[in-house]
Image: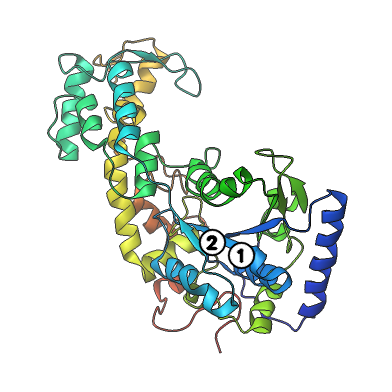
Amino acid sequence: MTEAAMIIVPTDISQKIREIETAYQHYLTEFRIPDDHKIVVNYSGGKDSTVTLAVAYALYGDRVRGVMADTDNEHELTIAYGKTIHEQIGCAPVQVVKKTYTEADFLRRREYLKKNWPKRQVIRMGAYRGIVMPSLARSDTKFGQAWLRTAERWGIEFETALEAALSVMHPSGNSFLDCALLHGKFPMLRDRFCTDELKIQIAFESAMKPMLDEGDVVVQWSGVRADESSKRSGYQRFSTDNRDPEFLYNFLPIHQWAATDVFALHKHFGIKPNPLYTQGAARVGCMNCVLCNKEEIAETAARWPEHIHKHKEWELKVRLTSRWVHWMSVGEVSQRWMKQFDLPLGREVQIYGIQPDVQHIDWSGFYGPRGNLNSPGVDEVVEWAKTGRGGKVYDLVKASLDTSVCSSRYGLCE
């Protein structure tokens, strides 16, 4: 999707709403869905879910219910917007739900660490396949002694990596951080457990499952648009939901809409968009999403540095729960040599008078690998985000960003 500013153009919103109503009635007939079914709108506080909720309520009134999942990694303006959007639309207040991790959840994870981290572990895939990770519960081995130097560098006082991990394996009160601690890593492109656990599952359990248990048929409306990504463009507009295929269905009413149509509908109904859209945001939701782009990271660092600081603090905690980070922290490059020459982990490496460089990895990166940086933390990713294409020269436009004036990628500033 282009990052260039888009100008809202006149469009026949009334006709688009009629098209949604006609298509929906067709699907209800095709799938034999009863007239007294319930409608649940997956609400995020963004432009697309806002118009989805507005259209659903305009067509079906009090049958519609909105549910918003708070991941504890949202901007406070987004949460406030979601809690008050009913005042603009006229519908019932959106139900705000949150996944809460308990001491019992962390107890199970602590028991897992106690059982498995003392054992050696063979890496089964990737560049280090075949290398044996040593015990992380001993300080009397060469690896254990090397890790103690890592602990000193990190500013922590524990005898073993296992003790360090157990020290943070307790509920923090923040759902996103707790989720990452229990997984021992931050979400990634191919492992988006944050979306599954903090949004999809909790919304289903809190809003839809009680209706299904009462015998209701439920259709969940989602503001997914095809032009957001190639993956979303392939979604069916209407489908059964595998979690309860005879009683739960999915509908994407604005699947073929453009962003210009979305903001035109805001004007049609007199709805003010989420204020973040006039503060430089291209999308709203998690602040930031671990998959956000370079421009979004630079924008956040300039306008809301407190969120960058928050992510940096999270990195310091989540790194302690990762067996991989503990192992890599003693010297990533030297361990490649150990694999190449079939040497045991922790041995002083010297071959024909040549010693390998040692690269210490100190992160469990919130943003993952970026810009060809081998092991970037939040600070390094932010500096990279301030550069232009190629990541070597600072972008003067980003450097001169005026955060005090209206800035909209969608032409919302007057």
Give x and y (percent) for residue 174. Answer: 33, 50
In x, y percent, where is residue 146? 20, 23
Residue 287 visible to the viewer:
yes
Q: Is residue 309 left or right of residue 62?
A: left
Residue named by callout 2: 44
Residue 76 as seen in the image, left or right of residue 232 = left
Q: Nearer the viewer, residue 53 or 233?
A: 53
- The answer to the question of whether label 2 and label 1 lie on touching residues, with beta carbons closer than 8 A, is yes
Give the residue type at disc 2: Ser
Q: Which mark is residue 235?
A: none
What separation in Å lies between label 2 and label 1 (alpha carbons)?
6 Å
- List the residue tagged with mark 1: 49
Q: Residue at x 38, y 41 (%)?
A: 180
Callout 2: SS: loop
Residue at the spot 55% in from the left edge and 77% down from the top edge:
273
Provide the secondary structure element on which disc 1 rests: helix
Question: In which quarter of the view is residue 342 placed?
Answer: top left
Residue 236 shows in the view: no
Q: For label 1, count other residues whose C-alpha is less than 10 Å away and answer few (under 14), some (14-19) or many (20+).
A: many
Question: Is 72 located above or below residue 109 in the figure?
Answer: below
Image quadrant containing the N terminus: bottom right
Residue nearer the viewer, 192 or 141: 192
Q: Position of residue 80 (x, y in %)?
A: 43, 70
Residue 5 image position (x, y, % from top left): 61, 75
Q: Amino acid at mark 1?
A: Ser
